Image: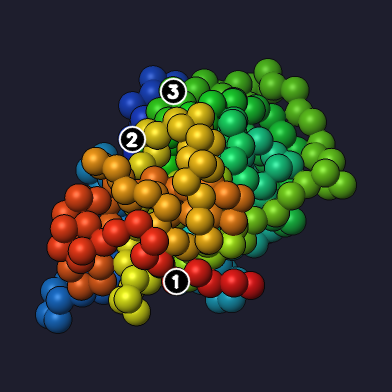
């Protein structure tokens, strides 16, 4: 029986935790997660993380240390009492000091959503889409002090489809993770897995992404803007403005590459509506190709289909969305 501690916080972590709990050969001794967060409504109780809620369902001890850097000696002493083979970390959300890595006999492992050393950092799924990659995957690495730089013990590739956005790609990745992770954890503890050091010279990095990244620069290529939309689908989407009003824009990801390439025959200046079809508004980009939109949401208004936006705002070819130049 493999004995682990689990460190995680959001819903995706809770999904993985439940799969591990249900595994016949793994026993979760305790869970570490972030503190309860205040609810948005005054007077309501604080809200636990999804991981804490899941651990409570299975009567697993839960620790919610305020900090791991200072004054964490009591917490360190508490978890030192457990007989754990390995710490398993997935989206915990706080930096874990190195002294915690070596508490279990096999150290600490982490599941990272890229094929390391590519895309170390906080937003590997978003950046795989931003870069137009056709594959990504999972890396199980042994945690070290340097971010996402530990030895690699297991990798699993996941294909990225043309129409994938953040949400659909995350669903694919999670399906893979809950399938292979229990056996990978057991193999790691039993010493069955070979490991490889990462090559820092070919490593790439990705930081956090905020909503402002979604502002469209129409002086970019159509595929760059399309990839931006895919990456930002869970972070506020992409936006421009029409008649000085901010609009959230939804490219139709089902329109194939060849159709977009053929849109060059209608090209106009970047940001200008090049053509209007039954279900789409096409906006010219800097590479003489156009981006097909099937939904638009003016700020403070409901989400509209392209035809509803055309009729409601009297849109016609030649009208312009603001084009932000660098």
Q: Are marks 1 and 2 in contact (CB under 8 Å)?
A: no
Quarter of the view holding residue 253: top left
**Residue at image mark 3:** 179
Report the colour scheme: rainbow
**Residue at image mark 1:** 322
Which of labels 3 and 2 is toward the front? 3
* Mark 2, secondary structure of its residue: helix
Position in image of residue 311 (x %, y %): 16, 58
Q: Residue at x 69, y 21 (%)?
A: 193
Q: From mark 1 to mark 2, how far is it between C-alphas?
A: 47 Å
Q: Which mark is residue 18?
A: 2
Which of labels 3 and 1 is toward the front? 1
Sequence-wise first label, 3 or 2: 2
Q: Residue at x 61, y 37 (%)?
A: 133
Q: From mark 3 to mark 2, how far is it between C-alphas?
A: 12 Å
Residue 35 as seen in the image, left or right of residue 191: left
* Mark 1, secondary structure of its residue: loop
């Amino acid at each position: 029986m493999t004995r682990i501690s689990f460190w995680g916080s959001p819903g995706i972590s809770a999904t993985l935790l439940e799969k591990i709990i249900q595994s016949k050969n793994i026993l979760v001794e305790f869970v570490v997660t972030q503190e309860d967060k205040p609810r948005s409504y005054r007077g309501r109780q604080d809200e636990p993380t999804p991981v804490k809620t899941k651990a409570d369902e299975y009567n697993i001890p839960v620790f919610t240390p305020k900090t791991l850097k200072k004054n964490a000696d009591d917490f360190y002493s508490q978890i030192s009492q457990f007989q754990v083979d390995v710490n398993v970390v997935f989206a915990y959300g706080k930096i874990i000091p190195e002294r915690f890595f070596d508490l279990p006999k096999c150290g600490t492992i982490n599941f990272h959503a890229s094929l390391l050393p590519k895309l170390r950092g906080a937003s590997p799924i978003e950046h795989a889409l931003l870069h137009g990659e056709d594959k990504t995957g999972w890396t199980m690495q042994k945690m070290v002090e340097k971010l996402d730089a530990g030895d690699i013990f297991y990798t699993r590739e996941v294909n990225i489809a043309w129409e994938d956005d953040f949400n659909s790609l995350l669903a694919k990745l999670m399906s893979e993770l809950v399938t292979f992770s229990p056996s990978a954890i057991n193999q790691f503890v039993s010493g069955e897995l070979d490991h490889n050091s990462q090559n820092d010279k070919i490593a790439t990095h990705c930081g956090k992404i905020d909503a402002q990244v979604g502002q469209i620069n129409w002086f970019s290529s159509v595929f760059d803007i399309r990839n931006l939309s895919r990456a930002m689908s869970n972070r506020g989407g992409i936006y421009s403005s029409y008649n000085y009003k901010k609009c959230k824009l939804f490219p139709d990801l089902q329109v194939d590459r060849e159709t977009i390439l053929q849109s060059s025959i209608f090209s106009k200046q970047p940001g200008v509506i090049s053509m209007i079809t039954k279900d789409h508004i096409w906006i010219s980009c800097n590479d003489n190709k156009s981006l097909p939109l099937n939904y638009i949401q003016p700020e403070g208004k409901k989400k509209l289909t392209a035809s509803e936006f055309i009729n409601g705002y009297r849109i016609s070819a030649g009208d312009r969305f603001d084009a932000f130049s660098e």
